[in-house]
Amino acid sequence: MSIPNTPSSGIADLTYRNYDGPMRTRAARFWTVALSVIRTNLKKPGFWIVGSLILLVYFVVGLLFFFTRNVTANARGAGAAISYPVAAQLGIQWTMFLLFIATLFVGSGSISADNKANALLVYLGKPLTKLDYLLGKWVGVFTLLASLTLLPSLVLYLFFLTSYYSDGFLKEQPLLGWRMLLSSLVGPMINSSLIVGISAYNKSPRTTGAIYAGFYLVLQALMGAGGFLFFRNALLDEDASVKADTRPAVRAATVQRLSVPGVVEGVSMSILKVQPKDLVIGGPTRFRDRVKAPEALPLALLGLGFVIVPLALARTKINAVEVVKG
Amino acid sequence: MGRYAPSPSYLGRDSYGYFERSETATCCPIAGRLSSWFDPGLILGTKLETKKSTTATFRQREVSWGITTTMAHVASSSELTVRYGNKTVLDQFTLDVPEGCIGLLGPNGAGKTTLIKTLLGFVKPASGRGQVLGLDCATQGLAIRQKIGLMPEQDCHIPGMNAVTFVAYAGEMAGMPPAQALRRGHEVLEWCGLGEARYRNVETYSTGMKQRIKLAQALVHGPKLLFLDEPTNGLDPQGRDEMLALVKDVSHGKGLSVIVSSHLLPDIEKTCDEVIVMRRGEVVAQGPISQLKQTGGFQVEVDFRTWSEKFVAALRARGGQEVWRQGTTARFAFDTEPTEPVGGLIFAVARESGAQVRGFRPAVRSLEDIFLEAVAQ
């Protein structure tokens, strides 16, 4: 029996030495996990491709804003220029699907890959709590997704600021920067919580991705169809009644947004103070005026549920060892 | 070095022979406490803290020349009861694990894994108390896991990382600053024999290499106590020898205690100084292997060319009882050591009975005997 590699190693002293160097306090442990998630995902080409596409979409939004404001607004018979908040909202809405794809790239394996490789034994064999681990994973995924939405929003805001400062942009929209910041974080927050929560219950990143995609798309389709039927009935009732009642249309708009992208859209509209009719491009004005904004409270509560419930469920699932009851 | 001889860690010195900070701090406990209260780094939660020495449970022992020395237990439990639902796995379990390399043996369901899980703070005990390095396992699980290293039985790694990143990451999770963790990761991988493969993705490793990297990640932060669960699982004979050499090297003279849980008795025999045999949640045998191997009274093993009943009868007449026989080898026990030399006695009896004796030796029990006797009680 001999210690392997003794003679040929480049390191002169191969005997085991104890480590008595400095140790950090526990405060930074979750960030260590988060940094690892970030580093691992930054190596994935898919993340950069989706990130570039999101930036491209924001570039298109910027161009659209520029043309409606500087070119077509001066032409006779053209529609009104889109406002700053509407441009920001369009950026969020048009990149929502790309954010969903990025979530699949970044978050599918966040915990499920660890489950598959028994990595929890390594993590929880160290001085980490379940909360440190979960928070680290969530912060890692959230930071990556937030960077995909925040950076383009920042670029768009800087475009507004530099190009329209002399037109009184800051006086007109003094809080737009904060509103854009907040609204850009809604999508990453919900998406990262859901994917991390689902990931905790699986041992395969592919299964996690499939379940998340199913939940995201099926719920969106169901609620979209339900909302459409509600809206159609609301319009028919409105036409038939003498007294105008907008509540069914509001209810329809709310039902239509009871999904992941719907909640992101609805909450960010509330933050940016954008009306849905401003987002409807084309169509008769009579129809556009009848599109109502959803109720903010139910959507905000559902969004909060999308953030908290998956993480709470994930916490119950994360264990270093299987403990058989009974 | 005997079992009770003070090792460097008893004396509060680190591996380089210097006193550790906490040892000097204990000279003036009030000043030490005040400095920790008014330490802004601790309040901000960002301070780098010097690693404190192991706070082992000490049992004072008077030695004959009048100096008080201490004997440390790296882990202990007192009337520890652990239940999974209605099933009681450990019932009023009391155990002291001394420093050194300790083998934890027991048949399936004996409670070894439950004991380890409980000591590491993964499972909450229903009652009683467990301590690891002087820290309570029910309330100080994190502090315990800071000071110990765990090499689990199952294959486990963090996906998508090469070996050095993985080991350095394990060090960072234990609290090491990133630069130190990376440097130490390289060192530990060299020591484990993975120096050449350190930049390969861990997922591409062979079973033997995976076992080594599990050991490396357990050692990276310089633990005072190492839990090894089946360290030679899935290894070929050469890999097994190398792993056992590593375990033996790290557990002797490095200020590090090791608890090895294994079903492979030769592995335990090769690496450990002491064993604890468990059965159905209780300790049925414990002690240094050399002591446990000693037989009661005086026993001798005799190897015959052909089996001879006459020899047995003649030896019985001189107080020797046959206690065990396998083929042409038999073990005879005497209540007291014979007054005449054993060789002379054996030859005299052989001459008298006409038996042909090929050889004889004082009998010792194997670890397997100890294990089988203990679990059969």
Image (cartoon, rainbow, N blue to C red):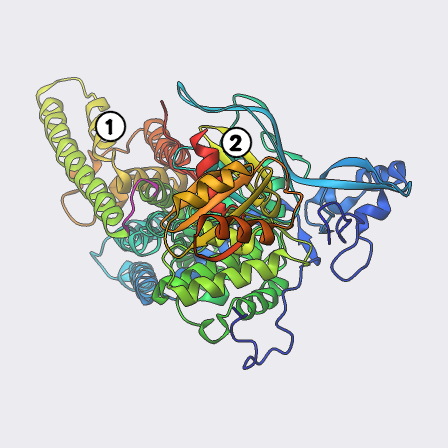
Identify which residue, B318 or B9, lies in the foreground: B318
User: Mark 2, mark 1: which one is toward the viewer?
Assistant: 2
- Residue at image point 80% right, 35% down: B60
The chain containing the residue under callout 1 comes to A
At which x and y percent is residue B293?
A: 56, 45
- Hey, what amino acid is under mark 2? Val
- Residue at image point 43% right, 59% down: B211
User: To which residue does mark 2 refer?
Assistant: B284
The chain containing the residue under callout 2 comes to B
* Magenta part of the chain: A200-204
Identify which residue, A142 or A275, lies in the foreground: A142
Callout 2 touching callout 1 (CB < 8 Å): no
- Hey, what amino acid is under mark 1? Val
- Considering the numbered disc 1 on the image, is that residue within a helix, a strand or a loop? helix
Is residue A251 depicted above or below A318 in this figure?
A: above
At which x and y percent is residue B260?
A: 52, 48
At which x and y percent is residue A180?
A: 43, 48
In-image side of B305 versus B218 (left or right)? left
The circle on residue B340 is none
Q: CA distance from mark 2 to mark 1?
A: 74 Å
Q: Is residue B120 visible?
A: no
In-image side of A22 versus A139 (left or right)? right
Identify which residue, B2 or A269, lies in the foreground: B2
Residues behind callouts 2 and 1 on a single chain:
no
State yes or no: residue A183 in magenta: no
User: To which residue does mark 1 refer?
Assistant: A250
Identify which residue, A229 or B344, lies in the foreground: B344
Q: Quadrant of the C terminus of chain A?
A: top left
Q: Quadrant of residue B291?
A: top right
- Considering the numbered disc 2 on the image, is that residue within a helix, a strand or a loop? strand
Q: Quadrant of residue A313?
A: top left
Is residue A11 depicted above or below B337 in this figure?
A: below
